[in-house]
Image (cartoon, rainbow, N blue to C red):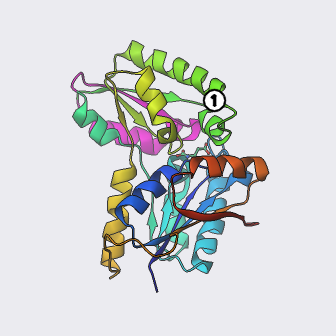
């Protein structure tokens, strides 16, 4: 029997983490769940997000997953501690890559782009205070970018306008590193690279993948570079058809089975 993990997000964003896991740990099976019926998470209350995380954890357990990856910054800062206390499934979260960005910035000026929830969170502020030392860290929130990415490709031109708005502020701050602190944003990393030449775009997928590897090895799972014979990702959503289209758009380069609807 193969090793199976569950990866979740409010929408397509966690696919950026899933892609890295699939590339680096090809012999494990993954289940991806997009909570699109409740997206976006950005301005939702912590208690709402915790309730959703518990439902998804039960779903992953029923599917035989041995690890749950909360591939969402907003859900991690809002609920990972309560989730860990209430489930026996090992939980891996995703945190803004403030530490590597502050280390790599030679100008010592960094911008962090997040959802409203993450931007106001105590956890983000703690991370910044812990790792910034002499770096000036600017935090920016985007109300709509995650939702626009979930509506791609039709929302492309509005997303471009939002990137122009954000990039102008990052340039004014003279940052040479931009932390993408929402897992949706790396899906359009190329658009940030074009808008912000010379600015390093920092995202967390490799760190999360390394943590998945560590936990699976500690559980005694055998990891290898061999690909499984069958497609090793199953994608589930509770979202309406329009959302499902966007999920197929963003999962084109993932070897996945069909996208399935699940009513949770
Ligand atoms: N992908 C998410 C994050 O990392 C959630 C975005 C949202 O639903 O607002 O924050």
Judged left or right of residue 86, residue 94 is left
Residue 45 shows up from this direction? no
Question: Taking 98 as reference, is 109 above or below it?
Answer: above
Which x, y percent locates residue 210? 32, 60
As rendered, which of 139 and 208 lies closer to the eye?
Answer: 208
Which x, y percent locates residue 45? 65, 47
Quadrant containing the C terminus in the rendered view = bottom right
Residue 173 shows up from this direction? yes
Q: Residue at x 29, y 41 (%)?
A: 99
Question: Taking 224 as reference, is 22 above or below it?
Answer: above
Q: Mark 1 vs ligand 1: CB under 8 Å?
A: no
Q: Is residue 42 magenta?
A: no
Question: Taking 188 as reference, is 54 above or below it?
Answer: below
Whereabouts is ligand 1, in terms of quadrant? Answer: top right
Q: Residue at x 35, y 80 (%)?
A: 221
Density class for disc 1 (Cα within 10 Å; few <14, some 14-19, many ≥20) is: few
Q: Is residue 115 magenta?
A: yes
- What segment carries the magenta color? 106-133
Q: Residue at x 41, y 60 (%)?
A: 21
Q: Which residue is mark 1?
A: 156
Which x, y percent locates residue 36? 69, 52
As rendered, which of 166 and 234 lies closer to the eye?
Answer: 234
Identify the image quadrant of residue 57: bottom right
Q: Residue at x 65, y 42 (%)?
A: 150
Q: Residue lying furthest front in this view?
A: 229
Question: Taking 229 as reference, is 26 above or below it?
Answer: above
Determine the secondary structure under disc 1: helix
């Amino acid at each position: 029997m193969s090793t199976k993990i569950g990866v979740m997000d409010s929408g397509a964003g966690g696919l950026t983490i899933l892609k890295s896991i699939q590339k680096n740990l090809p012999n494990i099976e993954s289940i991806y769940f997009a909570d699109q019926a409740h997206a976006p998470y950005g301005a939702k209350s912590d208690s709402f997000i915790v309730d959703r995380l518990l439902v998804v954890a039960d779903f992953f357990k029923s599917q035989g997953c041995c690890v749950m990856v909360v591939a969402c910054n907003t859900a991690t800062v809002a609920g990972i501690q309560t989730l860990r206390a209430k489930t026996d499934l090992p939980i891996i979260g995703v945190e803004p890559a403030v530490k590597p960005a502050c280390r790599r910035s030679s100008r010592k000026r960094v911008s962090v782009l997040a959802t409203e929830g993450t931007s106001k969170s105590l956890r983000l502020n703690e991370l910044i205070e812990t790792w910034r030392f002499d770096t000036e860290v600017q935090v920016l929130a985007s109300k709509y970018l995650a939702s626009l990415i979930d509506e791609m490709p039709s929302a492309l031109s509005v997303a471009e306008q939002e990137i122009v708005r954000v990039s102008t502020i990052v340039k004014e701050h003279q940052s040479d590193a931009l932390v993408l602190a929402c897992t949706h944003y790396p899906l359009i990393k190329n658009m940030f690279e074009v808008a912000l030449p010379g600015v390093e775009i920092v995202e967390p997928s490799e760190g999360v993948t390394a943590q998945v590897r560590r936990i699976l090895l500690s559980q005694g799972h055998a990891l290898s570079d061999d690909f499984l014979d069958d497609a090793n990702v199953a994608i589930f959503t509770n979202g309406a058809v329009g959302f499902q289209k966007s999920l197929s758009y963003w999962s084109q380069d993932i070897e996945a089975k069909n996208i399935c609807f699940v009513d949770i």
